[in-house]
Amino acid sequence: MEYRELGRTGVKVSALTLGTMTFGEQNTEAEGHGQMDYALDLGINLFDAAEIYPIPPKPETQGRTEDVIGTWLAGRKNRDKVLIATKVAGRSTKIDWLRDETKLSRQSAAQINEALDKSRARLKTDYIDLYQLHWPDRPMRIFEGLEYERLPGDSHTIHDILETLGALVRDGKVRFIGLSNETPWGVMSFLKLAEMHGLPRIVSVQNAFNLVNRSYEIGLSEITYEEQVSLLAYSPLGQGYLTGKYEHGALPPKSRKTLFDRLGRYEKGNGPRAISAYVALAKKHGLDPAQMAISYAVSRPFVTSAIIGATTMEQLKTDIDAADLKLSGQVLEDIDQIHLDYPNPCP
């Protein structure tokens, strides 16, 4: 397993991160523990969670993912062997079940503090290695589309949010802070205000990056190079579509598409054509489509770690083995040609 520096921290993280959002919904506690055991044995040292997990988010399951990680940490007594990342929810017009007082999630000082304390309790740890803002507090469209769309409403200022996070770092509850689902303007604003006011510097941004969504390259990749903000790339498999398992309308039992039907962005426009082209390309070169997709993400110079997730041990083994795959120049050329034919069809 290759290890890369997380931001400017001097801390090295594995090129693959174990995503855990299936724990407590599609995976049982025992299965989650098995995945963490296997991942750690193969050199993965960063596990990523969130207060709203498992997915899909709902009040009756919220927090179960962190519970599963917490019982694993308590049972294995190996807290010093892993880096734990989790996230606080951003501004929502729907999620009102996260806090003791029923209210919509926001990134106020009170809500961030409450969220962190609850996460630490579920995770059974005194500190979080990487605490991330799951999505912005600003009223804007996120998770789908390339263009910026500002929505009505106010937000807590980035300066106020940074001050809140800074207090958590000073208190030893958090080691490092990061962003998720952020824009270039947002990342640079956090960096500028941290420098201006002597507040903690963000070390990472967790955004989607995969063969059918390379939008990170457009503006954010330069920030990675020039500011050393690590990309933790989520969804390298396009929520499973780039494995080929949904080709020709297939609905594998227990898959997310079959269970929840929440993956519409991969079924619009040129998405299906691009996905089929990448799957066919992998097969043409004798590669596993999932491994080709993961290897591509890991090979990008602006990617620090690609976040993988699985519901079966067979899937997890396939994904982790992708860390040893080096794509040939011809495969990379063919990938770029498909990207020219179908640029970013699934942002």
Image (spheres, helix red, strand yellow):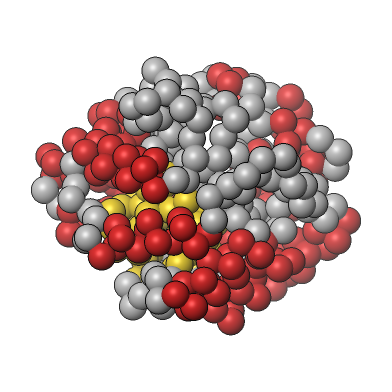
The relative height of residue 236 versus residue 324 in the rendered view (above or below) is above
Residue 280 in view here: no
| Residue 219 appears anywhere in the view | yes
Q: Residue at x 11, y 48 (%)?
A: 77
Q: Is residue 242 above or below residue 221?
A: above
Q: Residue at x 19, y 47 (%)?
A: 125
Residue at 71 percent of width and 68 percent of height: 219
What residue do we see at 40% from left, 71% from top?
A: 199
Name the quarter where the N terminus is drawn. Answer: bottom left
Q: Is residue 157 left or right of residue 2?
A: right
Q: Closer to the camera, 343 or 136?
A: 136
| Residue 188 percent location from the top left of the image | 60, 70
Relative image position of residue 50 (x, y in whole percent): 41, 41
In the rendering, at what x and y percent does residue 278 appear? 73, 50
Q: To which quarter of the image does residue 110 belong? A: top left
Left or right position of 275 against 69: right
Taking the view exactly as shown, the residue that stands out farthest to the bottom is: 226
**Residue 267 vertical placement versus 162 (above, below):** above
Is 334 or 211 nearer to us in this picture?
Answer: 211
Percent across and percent down for residue 232 are 50, 59
- 32 in relation to 346, above or below: above
